[in-house]
């Protein structure tokens, strides 16, 4: 088992580093595109903003639950650790199998390709440069993280500042276009009919845009004074994300109107183009490139820690579980995750993988937070450095809402949901193989 006495991570991340990881892990490329999808499924700006507020509150409930889990078990691995302790090694392995081997590298491949696309647009490079730039970005991020969490944190903090600056510019431009009026926010869009119950479908992309807040828990083994730092960083980072998302959507509505937002393919670029023309679109492309690059950095760092923890548990190659004694980084896990992400980037199959593993990811969130009930019951007599408020209401609301989202997704996309469950099920025989290897090594 991996615990604080057996690993060699060094606790170097402070509150601001942790908050930057939360912001960077949540804000990728989704907020620059997803609001258009939400606008298509709502009738006016008011319900659109309400959905983003509701999604933010639900995610904050999940973040507060993760804060208690992280404070109770401040180790690298996050959900994998919680599932292993509460429900056993099989559910933990299935989570790691789905996330560390498929979802993490798949999302890195997808977002790195998005980064490369915007990077090439901003630099005027031809389309055939996209894949080489994406591969180079992944290799560069892995290379920096090989030198430890401090080097990765410096890079992450820089790109978090750049992405927040891009969002601030977008908000200022959007509000400037409003000329002090709120008509575009409150006006009802009569250009298309919205069926009753469509708000449920509109909530799905909102919740997915708020995903990624769990990465800090994956890095909990490198957080200073984790019992105090984790709750503060998670809360600060997530509140900042919710405020950013609401302001960006207000900027879209004031700059484009609800109908214009619903019809836009690239709303952020459209808002900037209103004032700055083609140069504005280029500026926004640079901002989105910074945002997506920062997300890739966090996903690689967090995913490698999960992979390393699995290796240390004997649930993957033992060599992957090693931590470099000089730089205190899971260098082999980083190389494996980055290498697999590069393969997926070159193959171009990451889109389907992400569609297929979405249900598995959110199942992991639901069961991960459900472990809080087990911890409260199992360690009822032990004091916790942080306790989620309004327990058991907040974890119950989050778990039931996420399960509802999964059911709605399965109804809307039964093929993708079925493939996701199949991928999870394929992990069962793989788990049996690794358990067999463990027993043979013990003899």
Image (tube, rainbow, N blue to C red):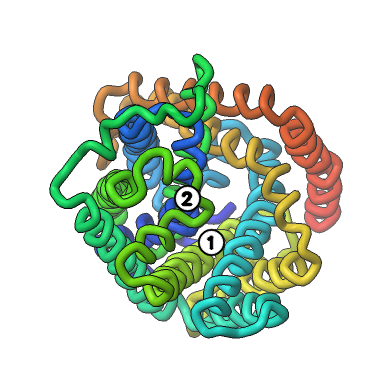
Residue placed furthest toward the front: 191
Which residue is disc 2 drawn over?
Answer: 212
Image quadrant assignment for residue 319: bottom right
Picture residue at 81% right of the left edge, 49% below the top:
439
Picture residue at 53% right of the left edge, 18% below the top:
195
Q: Residues within 10 Å of mark 1 (few under 14, many from 20)?
A: many
Residue placed furthest toward the top: 196
Q: Is residue 426 visible?
A: yes
Q: Position of residue 316 (x, y in %)?
A: 73, 58
Q: Earlier in the sequence, mark 1 or mark 2?
A: 2
Q: Position of residue 347 (x, y in %)?
A: 80, 66
Left or right of 235: which side holds 189?
right
Q: CA distance from mark 1 to mark 2?
A: 9 Å
Picture residue at 86% right of the left edge, 41% below the top:
429
Which residue is disc 1 drawn over?
Answer: 299
SS of the residue under disc 1: helix
Q: In the rendered structure, are the residues bearing label 1 and label 2 in contact, judged by CB atoms less than 8 Å apart?
A: yes
Q: Position of residue 58 (x, y in %)?
A: 37, 31
């Amino acid at each position: 088992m991996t615990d604080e006495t057996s690993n060699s991570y060094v606790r170097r991340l402070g509150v601001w580093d942790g908050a930057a990881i939360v912001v960077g892990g949540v804000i990728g490329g989704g907020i620059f595109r997803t609001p258009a999808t939400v606008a298509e499924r709502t009738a006016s700006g008011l319900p659109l903003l309400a959905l983003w507020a509701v999604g933010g509150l639900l995610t904050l409930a999940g973040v507060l639950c993760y804060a208690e889990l992280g404070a109770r078990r401040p180790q690298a691995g996050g959900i994998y650790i919680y599932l292993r302790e509460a429900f056993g090694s099989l559910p933990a392995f299935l989570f790691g199998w789905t996330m560390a081997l498929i979802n993490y590298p798949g999302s890195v491949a997808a977002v790195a390709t998005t980064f490369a696309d915007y990077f090439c647009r901003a630099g005027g490079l031809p389309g055939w440069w996209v894949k080489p730039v994406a591969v180079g970005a992944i290799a560069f991020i892995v290379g920096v993280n090989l030198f430890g969490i401090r080097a990765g944190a410096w890079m992450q903090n820089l790109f978090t500042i750049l992405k927040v600056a891009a969002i601030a510019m977008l908000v200022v431009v959007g509000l400037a276009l409003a000329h002090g009026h709120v008509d575009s926010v409150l006006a009802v869009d009569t250009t298309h009919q919205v069926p009753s119950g469509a708000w449920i479908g509109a909530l799905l992309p909102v919740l997915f845009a708020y995903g990624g807040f769990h990465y800090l828990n994956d890095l909990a083994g490198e957080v200073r004074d984790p019992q105090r730092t984790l709750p503060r960083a998670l809360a600060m980072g997530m509140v900042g994300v919710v405020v950013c998302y609401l302001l960006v959507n207000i900027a879209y509505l004031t700059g484009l109107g609800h109908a214009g937002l619903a019809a836009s393919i690239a709303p952020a670029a459209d808002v900037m183009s209103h004032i700055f023309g083609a140069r504005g679109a280029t500026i926004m492309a640079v901002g989105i490139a910074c945002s997506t690059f920062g997300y890739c950095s966090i996903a690689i760092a967090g995913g490698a820690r999960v992979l390393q923890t699995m290796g240390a548990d004997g649930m993957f190659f033992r060599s992957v579980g090693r931590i470099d004694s000089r730089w205190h980084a899971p260098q082999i896990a980083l190389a494996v995750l980055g290498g697999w992400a590069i393969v997926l980037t070159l193959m171009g199959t990451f889109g389907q993988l992400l569609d297929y593993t979405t249900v598995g990811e959110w199942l992991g969130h639901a069961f991960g937070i459900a472990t809080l009930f087990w911890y409260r019951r199992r360690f009822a007599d032990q004091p916790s450095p942080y306790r989620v408020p309004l327990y058991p209401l907040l974890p119950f609301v989050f778990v039931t809402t996420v399960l509802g989202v999964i059911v709605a997704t399965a109804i809307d996309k039964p093929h993708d949901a079925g493939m996701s469950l199949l991928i999870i099920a394929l992990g069962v025989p793989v788990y049996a193989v690794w358990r067999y290897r463990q027993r043979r090594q013990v003899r």
